[in-house]
Image: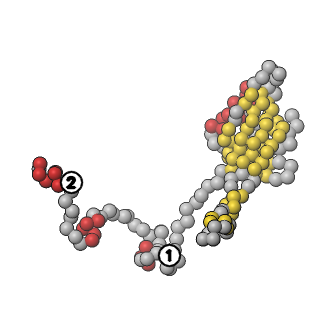
Amino acid sequence: MISVVSILDSDNYQVLFNDASLMKLDILDEIKVTQFQVEDGTTRSDHTVSLPIVINGAMLINENARVAFTNLRQAYLDNRLLIIQTRVNSYPSMLITGIPHTETIDNLLGVTVNIRFEEWRTVAPVYGELPLGTTRNPAQSSTVNRGQQQTTNADAEAGAEPRRKGSILSGVFN
């Protein structure tokens, strides 16, 4: 089948789903403008947020429909990261998030799958020294050398006597 795009495995760059052909793609590559109201009632914006890329497509599976759909479903269940390569751009780290399909009498030998891909973004925590002035206590500016943390009783920490636990009635009956 002739396809306008290629679907590649992110790990080894092998072309996947050779028995399927994407007939149409709708690519949503959007940003969201943040808005807030100010004292005079007007709305202002000061930055944007990049939204994950979403690709909706119509895929036609004609040859070996059962095997091809099983392979597609397995990639969906495994959360396999894919690269969608179109004529104008490549979209790495795409995850299949939906595979609704239609089986009709018009196409007895195949299946139309309305596949949905969404960009997978991994967030890596950042460890290190915080700039001075961002914390009240300079000893708390490091996120690396924290050691083992122990909990303490809030009353003992404040130097006050421990508060009585329970209500007034609990003292009457005990």
Q: Is residue 28 above or below residue 162?
A: above
- Residue 75 visible, this orientation: no
Label 2: which secondary element: loop
- In the rendered structure, the answer to whether residue 75 lies left or right of residue 108 reads left
Q: Position of residue 78 (x, y in %)?
A: 62, 39
The residue at which mark 1 appears reads as 134
The residue at which mark 2 appears reads as 166
Q: Is residue 25 above or below residue 41?
A: above
At 68% across and 53% down in the image, what residue appears? Answer: 52
Q: Position of residue 156 (x, y in %)?
A: 24, 68
The part of the image, by quadrant, that contains residue 67 is top right
Q: Residues within 10 Å of mark 1 (few under 14, many from 20)?
A: few
Q: How many marks can you see? A: 2
Q: Amino acid at mark 1?
A: Thr
Q: Nearer the viewer, mark 1 or mark 2?
A: 2
Asked whether disc 1 touches disc 2, contact meaning CB atoms under 8 Å apart, the reply is: no
Question: Closer to the N terminus: mark 1 or mark 2?
Answer: 1
Q: Amino acid at mark 2?
A: Gly
At 43% across and 77% down in the image, what residue appears? Answer: 136
- In the rendered structure, the answer to whether residue 167 lies left or right of residue 71 reads left
> Which of 142/155 is in front?
155
Q: Quadrant of the N terminus?
A: top right
At 62% across and 69% down in the image, what residue appears? Answer: 38
- In the rendered structure, the answer to whether residue 154 lies left or right of residue 59 reads left
At 63% across and 65% down in the image, what residue appears? Answer: 36
Q: Position of residue 166 (x, y in %)?
A: 21, 54
Label 1: which secondary element: loop
Q: Is residue 33 above or below residue 94?
A: below
